Amino acid sequence: MKPDLPEGLVIRDAVAADEAGWRRLWSEFLTFYDKDLPDSVTSRTWARIMDPAHPMSLRLAELDGAPTGFTLWQVHDSSWVATGDLYLEDLFVTPAARGGGIGRALIGDLVDIGRARGCTRIYWMTEETNVTARKLYDRFASPDGHIRYRADLTG
């Protein structure tokens, strides 16, 4: 599924010079989810993104040259298929730019990347209450019936 890109939208890999712009977007993303992370975690995430040996990658969406969204993603092996899976860990579009096709374009961009890398599937998760995002996600896939469990291993 290749969506039409909104006029003036560019989606590209992040480079070192994008750190400040990404951090602004990341801060908005964390605010949206009412989360607070230590700066050390954010710095480590950026270092992983910039490390070509690490699987984590960042695609930035720029509208008329201004950072307006991103996807954090990685390809990993699977025990269920012979090729890799592309996992979309985080997707964010600034509130002012929502509804203009940027989220759809970002997912479409990852679909293209996954196919180019020979992946069998792309998958992601969202909160059940994120109704707006789920309307977008339903254009690409249907929920697969899985429920996520996450245990804290630090306590």
Image (cartoon, rainbow, N blue to C red):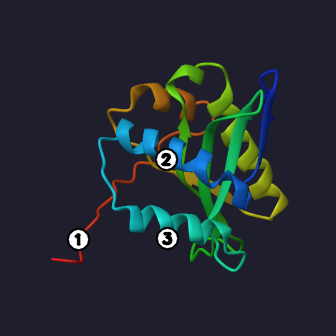
Question: Could you say which disc has been placed on residue 26 in the image?
Answer: 2
Residue kind at label 2, given as amino acid type: Trp
Residue placed most toward the observer, 86 or 38: 38
What SS does tag 3 mark? Answer: helix
Question: Would you place residue 133 above or below residue 49 in this image?
Answer: above
Q: Quadrant of residue 33?
A: top left
Q: Residue at x 59, y 40 (%)?
A: 141
User: Residue 128's x, y, as percent?
Assistant: 34, 37
Residue kind at label 1, given as amino acid type: Asp
Question: Could you say which disc has been placed on residue 152 in the image?
Answer: 1
Q: Is residue 147 left or right of residue 10?
A: left
Gap in angstroms between the C-alphas marked 3 and 1 = 19 Å
Q: Residue at x 62, y 55 (%)?
A: 19
The answer to which of marks 3 and 1 sits earlier in the sequence is 3
Question: Could you say which disc has been placed on residue 44 in the image?
Answer: 3
Q: Residue at x 50, y 25 (%)?
A: 95
Residue kind at label 3, given as amino acid type: Arg
Q: Residues within 10 Å of mark 1 (few under 14, many from 20)?
A: few
Question: Would you place residue 103 above or below residue 17 in this image?
Answer: above
The C terminus - image quarter: bottom left
What SS does tag 2 mark? Answer: helix
Residue placed most toward the observer, 89 or 77: 89
User: Residue 57's x, y, as percent?
Assistant: 66, 62
Question: Would you place residue 52 above or below residue 58 in this image?
Answer: below
Q: Are marks 3 and 2 in contact (CB under 8 Å)?
A: no
